Amino acid sequence: MYKGHYVIWILIIIATTFGIYGQSLAYFLENITNTNNAVYYLTAFTVSSILIYFVTPLIAYLMIKFEKMDDKFIPFYILIFGMLGIFVSLWSVFVCVMWWG
C-alpha cells in the first residue's frame, strides 16, 4: 500500500470521527474551556467533517492523476466517499440543526 492510501484513509477516519462523535467532542471541549459554547464547537466539527469529505476525493483524484495511486482503487474510493460521506454528513448536519433549535 502506498503512502497516498494512508493519507486517504486517515482523512476518511478523521471526517467520520468528527461527524459521528462531534457532539461528544463538543461537550469535551466545553468542559475543558469552561464556556457555554458547545453549539459553536459542534458547528465547527460538523463543517470540518463535511469539508474533509469534500477535499478527500479531490486529493485522491490528484494522486491518481500524478500517478501516486493506482487506477484500480477508483470505484472503491467512490463508494466509500459516496456512501459513508453522505450518511455521516447528513447525520452530523441533523444533529447540528437540532442543537441550534
Image (tube, grey):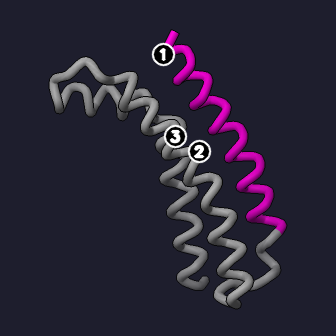
Seen in the picture, residue 87 relative to 66 is either above or below; the reply is above
Q: Earlier in the sequence, mark 1 or mark 3?
A: 3
Q: Which residue is mark 1?
A: 99
Seen in the picture, residue 82 relative to 32 is either above or below; the reply is below
Residue flagged by tag 3: what amino acid is it?
Answer: Val
Residue flagged by tag 2: what amino acid is it?
Answer: Ile
The quadrant in which residue 61 appears is bottom right
67 vs 29, left or right, is right
Q: Residues within 10 Å of mark 3 (few under 14, many from 20)?
A: some
- Residue segment shown in magenta: 75-101
Q: Earlier in the sequence, mark 1 or mark 2?
A: 2
Residue 36: image location, x then y, percent? 25, 18
Residue flagged by tag 1: what amino acid is it?
Answer: Trp
Label disc, if present, on residue 47 of the rendered structure: 3
The quarter of the rendered structure image containing the N terminus is bottom right
Q: Which residue is mark 2?
A: 50
Residue 77: image location, x then y, percent? 74, 64
Tell me if residue 62 is in the magenta stretch: no
Residue 98: image location, x then y, percent? 54, 14
Mark 1 vs 3: CB contact within 8 A: no
* Mark 1 vs mark 2, CA separation in Å: 17 Å
12 vs 61, left or right, is left
Q: Residues within 10 Å of mark 1 (few under 14, many from 20)?
A: some
Seen in the picture, residue 55 relative to 41 is either above or below; the reply is below
Residue at image location 70% in from the left, 37% down from the top: 87
Mark 3 vs 2: CB contact within 8 A: yes
Tell me if residue 97 is in the magenta stretch: yes
Observer-nearest residue: 68 or 47? 47
Residue at image location 67% in from the left, 32% down from the top: 90
